[in-house]
Image (spheres, rainbow, N blue to C red):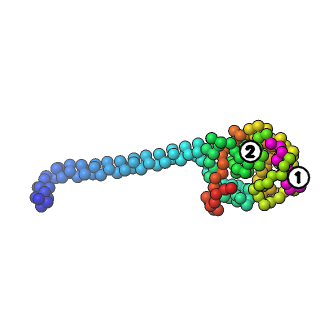
Amino acid sequence: MKLHNNKVKENRNPEENKIETEKTSKSRMNKVIKEVFSNITVILVAVVIGLFLNRYMIANAQVPTGSMETTVMAGDRIIVNRLSYVFGEPKRGDIVTFIYPDDGETLYLKRIMGLPGETIEGKEGVIYIDGNPLVEDFTQEVSYDNFGPYKIPEKSYFMMGDNRNDSWDSRYWKHKFVKREDIIGKAEFSYFPHPRLLK
């Protein structure tokens, strides 16, 4: 049967062969175009999903300074969960990204140390919350810079870096407190170059 088909093709006139070749060429071109469009569609969908995740669910950030060492090192790339506080409130000890209150635009990364309504104070290397020494201080580094007492307004937080002796934080800012609405999200983990969960 195959031989018979080959003979039929050989017996066609040149015009028929040309038409057949053009059909084959168009068919191949259509397949290539469909494949290109399919790949473009996949890429566009991935970009849209990535933009949506970055805008509403997660943020990818790089830490520029050593103010949170040794918990988060300068140069670490971290993932911030924007949905952390949709159904709950920030807690003491959470590492968060927020808008720096003194300029209203720069993103900072610090640890929440004081909660709304509390009075926070630092004396002789000890942090006091409402007059009581803070049991879990989240860092081994002690700073003997005294500060406060500061009464934290409602829906606001007092931030400190874990690298207490080299952190520009609520102790020194002109506007001491970060408003709840200015917290972007909770830093969940560092993925490069020091992969680990952040606590």
Question: Can residue 115 be seen?
Answer: yes
At horizontal 76% and vertical 37% (from top left) the residue drawn is: 154
Q: Quadrant of residue 57?
A: top right
- Tag 1: Cα neighbours inside 10 Å, few (<14), some, or many (≥20)? some
Question: Can residue 55 be seen?
Answer: no
Magenta span of residues:
118-130
Place of residue 109 in the rendered image (x, y in percent of width and height, measured from the top left): 71, 50
Place of residue 28 in the rendered image (x, y in percent of width and height, measured from the top left): 30, 52
Label 1: state its secondary structure: strand
Q: Is residue 90 left or right of residue 1?
A: right
Q: Considering depth in this image, is 173 or 131 the residue closer to the camera?
A: 131
Q: Are marks 2 and 1 in contact (CB under 8 Å)?
A: no
Label 2: state its secondary structure: loop
Q: Is residue 58 left or right of residue 177?
A: left
Task: Identify the mark at residue 100; answer none if there is no mark.
Answer: 2
Compared to 62, does 51 lie above or below? above
- Tag 2: Cα neighbours inside 10 Å, few (<14), some, or many (≥20)? many
Residue bearing mark 1: 123
Q: Is residue 70 left or right of residue 77?
A: right
